[in-house]
Amino acid sequence: MQKISILGATGSIGKNTIEVLSLHPDLYSVYAITAHSNIELLLRQAKTCSPEYVVISDPQLFSQAKKLFSEHGLKCEVLAGPDALEQVASATEVDVVMAAIVGAAGLLPTLAAVTAGKKVLLANKESLVMSGDLFIQAANQHNAQVLPIDSEHNAIFQCLPSDFKYGDLPASGISKILLTGSGGPFLSSTLSELHQVTPQQACAHPNWDMGRKISIDSATMMNKGLEFIEAKWLFGLNTSDIQVVLHPQSIIHSMVQYRDGSVLAQMGNPDMRTPIAHALAFPKRLESGVAPLDFKQLANFTFSEPEPQRYPNLYLAIQASDAGQYATTTLNAANEVAVEAFLQGHIGFTQIAEVNQECLQQTSSHTLVSVEEVLQSDQSARKLASHIIAELNLNAMKKVGS
Ligand code: NAD
Ligand code: MG
């Protein structure tokens, strides 16, 4: 029986994780589930998976949460605040940690799990984007096993040889990593239509049901950019080792091309329960609840290259990954601020990339050698992005007034 902590249990990945676990009560017990503010859902989840701890990361909700859980007669201990996230991610009793908090908020608890040498199921790609070098060093130093949940990285992992050497594609006979992406909901919109896109349209992904932030990132393809950076750190790759391929059907989840011309692809219905079950059980296989592929229903597979004018964020992320850790941290923070501003109706869809680009341009190169420095860079980039957004709005108001 393995004990698992689910960070970000109330999110899309968290809910899928609980579904997979519910099929295997003989194999896993839940140590902790965490949420930022959705106490009601956390309560319902606690009733079904009986954790020992629940964590509400917004400390202001602590007494409300404690009251609600005791009114419902739940025996689990209620904790609150960011330190409690790190506590349940690193507790001695815990074997496996699902790192599924969204955004930079996931960095410290995910690093705590890695530093405690846990088996870490990594959905929070932002922690690698922000601190890849420190993260991989910590994983090696503390013997943490990091298994990718992102469907593309999970697919690549499945297509690599079992004796794959980190950072050495030629030694494994590999010529290219083919990172697939659907292109999101605006693959065939005209470029001028992109200016009018609403948050609701951008959140409606054609194949995947995900949280709002990653849905917007999928529409701008910043998600693929973050995944590009994630893949570099996870497998030790260079920019030239990776090719992004558009595959709108989302049945192939990524591929590995070998020197002899063979291409190995991992396929399946677009459902995150597959990579979750894979990573949970690795190296074994578990039932996930996902329907098998029906090849009679698969009309055709198409592949193309992402256009730079349609997806400027993808190319900004690739440039940032070449510029270094400061640039990927800056880009990630700017993008979080810009996406939130778009969701709030403060900026337009195409302005997300403008804010990101401006923020990168205004940030000079610097080295990041500690988590504290990463967090400082993250905070400065957030301030700068907010300032850039305020200026954009001011200019827009001036235009209307003149
Ligand atoms: P979501 O928005 O649905 O859920 C986010 C979770 O994080 C929630 O439980 C929320 O309570 C928690 N959270 C939010 N802000 C927090 C904060 N400040 N402090 C602590 N907890 C906080 O997100 P999601 O779609 O489940 O994505 C989670 C992570 O997994 C992201 O990093 C995303 O990029 C990655 N991912 C998601 C998918 C997917 O299909 N949803 C696929 C691949 C990778
Ligand atoms: Mg993905």
Image: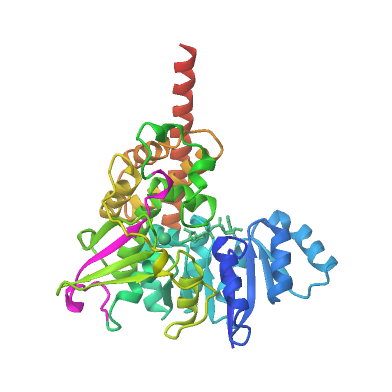
Instruction: Point out residue 388 in the picture as x, y percentages from the top left corner.
Output: 43, 33
Instruction: Point out residue 268 in the picture as x, y percentages from the top left corner.
Output: 42, 69
Quadrant containing the C terminus is top left
Please state the extent of the stretch shown in magenta in the rendering.
164-186
Asked whether, in this view, residue 347 is left or right of residue 22, the answer is: left
Q: Is residue 361 above or below residue 112?
A: above
Quadrant containing the N terminus is bottom right
Residue 172 seen in the current view: yes
In the displayed orientation, state which residue is furthest to the top: 402
Q: Nearer the viewer, residue 96 or 387?
A: 96
Q: Is residue 198 above or below residue 242?
A: above
Asked whether, in this view, residue 356 is left or right of residue 103, the answer is: left
* The image quarter in which residue 176 lies: bottom left
Residue 44 inside the magenta-drawn segment: no
Q: Residue at x 53, y 74 (%)?
A: 97
* The image quarter in which residue 64 lies: bottom right
Instruction: Point out residue 202 in the picture as x, y percentages from the top left corner.
Output: 48, 44
Q: Nearer the viewer, residue 60 or 301?
A: 301
Q: Residue at x 27, y 83 (%)?
A: 163
Q: Residue at x 37, y 65 (%)?
A: 253
